[in-house]
Amino acid sequence: IDTGHAQLARRMSGAPPVADFITDAGAQLAHVHLQDVDGHADRHWAPGEGEIEWTAVFRALATIESAPNLVLELRNKADIPKGFKSLSDLGLAV
């Protein structure tokens, strides 16, 4: 799952929230590409720069049986520390 793509689908065509994609994938989920968006384009922003509800995403991750790889997939690799810090500040990353 790509969080940014899922959020774009939500905003552009009424798809479910990003967390629902994770719950639906369940035990089949192997990889999650973490990127934030503003709902208008595939921005690949650091988490915290857009509108994705990260707490809900990580709550959903905690309920599934698989342990997917989480990858910060950002346009600018220099934003990786900022994205990690944003998730850490929410208590979602260690």
Image (tube, rainbow, N blue to C red):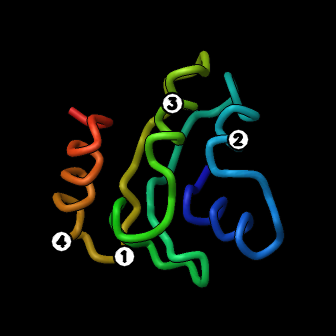
First-in-chain label (2 vs 4): 2
Q: Which residue is labeled 4 in the image?
A: 78
What amino acid is labelled 4 in the image?
A: Ala
What residue is rendered at 51% in x and 59% in y?
52
Give the numbered dot on residue 90.
none
**Label 3 belongs to which residue?**
59
Which class describes the residues within 10 Å of circle 3: few (<14), some (14-19), or many (20+)?
Answer: some
Q: Residues within 10 Å of mark 1 (few under 14, many from 20)?
A: some
Residue type highlighted by circle 3: Arg
Residue 57 % position (x, y) = 52, 41
Q: Mark 1 sits on what residue?
A: 75
Between marks 3 and 1 in the image, the one whose residue lies nearer the viewer: 3
Instruction: Give the position of the C terminus as an image quadrant.
Output: top left
Q: CA distance from mark 3 to mark 1?
A: 25 Å
Q: Residue at x 57, y 31 (%)?
A: 60
Identified by mark 2, the residue type is Asp
User: Percent position (x, y) of residue 53?
Assistant: 50, 52
Q: How far is the residue under mark 2 from the one under mark 3?
A: 11 Å
Above or below: residue 14 compared with residue 65: below
Query: Under tag 1, what secondary structure?
Result: loop
Q: Are marks 2 and 1 in contact (CB under 8 Å)?
A: no
Q: Give the distance between the C-alpha atoms of the residues marked 4 and 3, in whole angstroms.
A: 27 Å
- Mark earlier in primary sequence (2, 3): 2
Q: Earlier in the sequence, mark 4 or mark 3?
A: 3
The residue mark sitting in front, 4 or 3, is 3
Nearer to us: label 2 or label 4 = 2
